[in-house]
Image: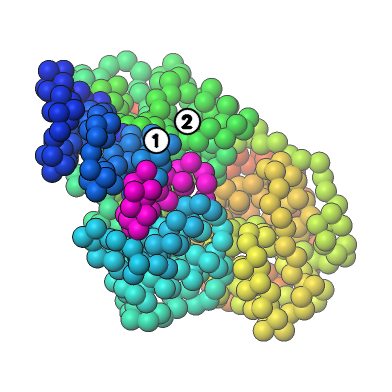
Amino acid sequence: MPAQVLPLPTPVQPAPDALQALLARARSGLPLGELMSAANALQAKGQLDAAAQLYETWLAQPQADGHKPVALFNWGTVLGSLRRHEAAEAAYRQALALKPNFAQARLNLAHQCEHLGRHDEALACWREVYEGVTTLDCVGADPQDLQLHAMNNSARLLEQLKRYDESEALMQRSLLLKPTQGDVIQHYVHIRQKQCEWPVHQPLGAVTPNQLLVHTSLLAMLSHSDDPALQLLTAQRFVFEKVDKPASRPYHRQHGPQQREGRVRLGYLSGDLCMHAVGLLSAELYELHDRSRFEVRAYEWSREDGTPLRERLKRAFDERVSLHGLDDDSAARRIAADGVDVLIDLQGLTSGARPGILVRRPAPVQVSYLGLPATSSVPGIDFMLADRFVMQSDYLPYCSERPIYVEPCYQVSDRQREMGKPPRRAQYGLPEQAFVFAVFNNNHKISAEMYGCWMRVLQQVPGSVLWLLADNRWAEANLRAAAHAAGIAAERLVFAPRVSPADYLARFALADLVLDTFPYNAGTTASDCLWAGAPILTLSGRSYISRMCGSLLTAAGLPDLITHSLTDYERLAVAIGRQPARAASYRRYLAEQGRSSPLFDVPAIVRSIERQFAHLAAQARAGEALRPLE
């Protein structure tokens, strides 16, 4: 369903004489068909600038108006591929001025408006297509295909704008027209999760239950099921459909140095080195690497969000290589040519990930870390950083990556987190005397089963309240409705607005007990919670992602807050809620010993990671089989 993102090609220019000959023919009356063939040939060779110049030259000559709309459309397409969005918009508008009912020109005009940040205009253009397709000229295309294109891109953009109800309505219309659209099904399931609309796998028209499950995204599956086989199936399906096939010969052998010498060169691959959970957790990791033994590079396409964290992350690397505008093949060639020993992927299959780089194997050792706490099934990712709690032996058959066990905990964190001024309960609408259960995980991680458990806990702990993250109004309405159905008074749900990272950390002081989600455990949120001194109750299951919080609690010295069944989780939440002194004792422990616990011994975790990376790099340099330290 998302619009295709076309990478910038490696600049290639035709021979000057050949291009000049083409331009001369364009000025002398080249027929439209021959113009298009010549331009297509240039595009196929990656010579987009030359193709754009050819169309521009042809269009500058006197032409029959009947030919111009198609040439203008094609010119706009090339300009859009070159990211020259304003020029592309102008080309499409010229085409529509000559042929107002040109459906494809209106579709692509919407894409340019989106790129230029004019979202309402983009949505209006797409609406004109999907509502009025029968009155438009589809120029040889199937009208329904164009209608679906307009609907699906509108739904995608509306979802990004958090207009979830409008987005879901369009997805439903699209699937009623054509139920076999896997990409639309994927977004339909996840947008229901975001709104806490249960069941998330709601039957619709001719879409089968099997289609709903099979096309669930990996992110959505991590919130839906603790079955590692289903998580693996989802990852494999995505890789099969969306990821390039593995390179026949690893790029580090084709394009890298024959011998690697000197310090071990680490490359961190990410688009999230900014105000993002990965960036928030990992800043100190890069800063603490031993520069006498390691050179640390970032290969990134992160957004420039203007935050102090972004600037700090940029300073933490010896060198940063921007992959903006480089296609996967060119990016992989660059990493290989740089002689990276260990490439650490921080995204897996999360939004914005670039697995096409990894399948080309630009480094002899490739490792998954932090961004995706599950198997990605991407060929070329050899290992996943883990610890022996989060990644147990019975999980290994369902994980394409091999574990690299580090101590004392898999997760690094940042000891320089800024804590805001201590708040008061009244600031957030919390009753002064109530026992406060808090859940600050994203709403899409909340399952119907876990929410039902929380409602039973509230029923058994008189006067308690549940403090939830206010993510969107539809989720809030659905959560309130589910609470009402369970007999919980409206005032016992309190929703916390999003605030700055410092104020977010400070408000953990107002929670008596934080409740974790399952099967998608808290990761960064659990680290923040424990750093801020608040106890968190978790349920650990079979998968990596359902054991993250338990790993952190083990390293923090609070294993008694780990449960292994929903019944035990509910029982312990009620017991602590009825004994506020018990919650207070956990707080005292964290205040006195939490930050000095192994969980926050970040230098020790970094040294453990470095031992593994140095060992694997030495094996790779010697041409030996890769085997992590036990």
Prevailing secondary structure of the magenta residues: helix
**Colour setting:** rainbow
Residue 141, percent from left and from top: 23, 61
559 in relation to 343, above or below: below
Residue at left offset 58%, top offset 76%: 567
Residue at left offset 42%, top offset 68%: 131
- As drawn, the label of residue 87 is 1
- Mark yes or no: residue 56 visible: yes
Of labels 1 and 2, the one closer to you: 1
65 in relation to 434, above or below: above
Residue, disc 2: 607
Q: Secondary structure at mark 1?
A: helix
Which one is nearer the viewer's eye here, 571 or 441? 441
Amino acid at dot 2: Arg
Would residue 38 be counted in the magenta stretch? no
Q: Is residue 523 left or right of residue 130?
A: right
- Mark yes or no: residue 615 visible: no
Q: Which numbered disc, 1 or 2, marks the residue that appears first in the sequence?
A: 1
Amino acid at dot 1: Ala
Residue at left offset 16%, top offset 21%: 20
Q: Secondary structure at mark 2?
A: helix
Residue at left offset 43%, top offset 20%: 319
Would residue 99 be counted in the magenta stretch? yes
Quarter location, residue 491: bottom right
Label 1 and label 2: CA atoms lie apart by 52 Å
Crowd tier of the residue under label 2, counting other residues whose Cα lies within 10 Å: few below 14, some 14–19, many 20 or above = some
| Magenta residues, start to end | 94-119
Residue 580, percent from left and from top: 80, 64
Residue 498, percent from left and from top: 68, 52
Quarter location, residue 613: top left
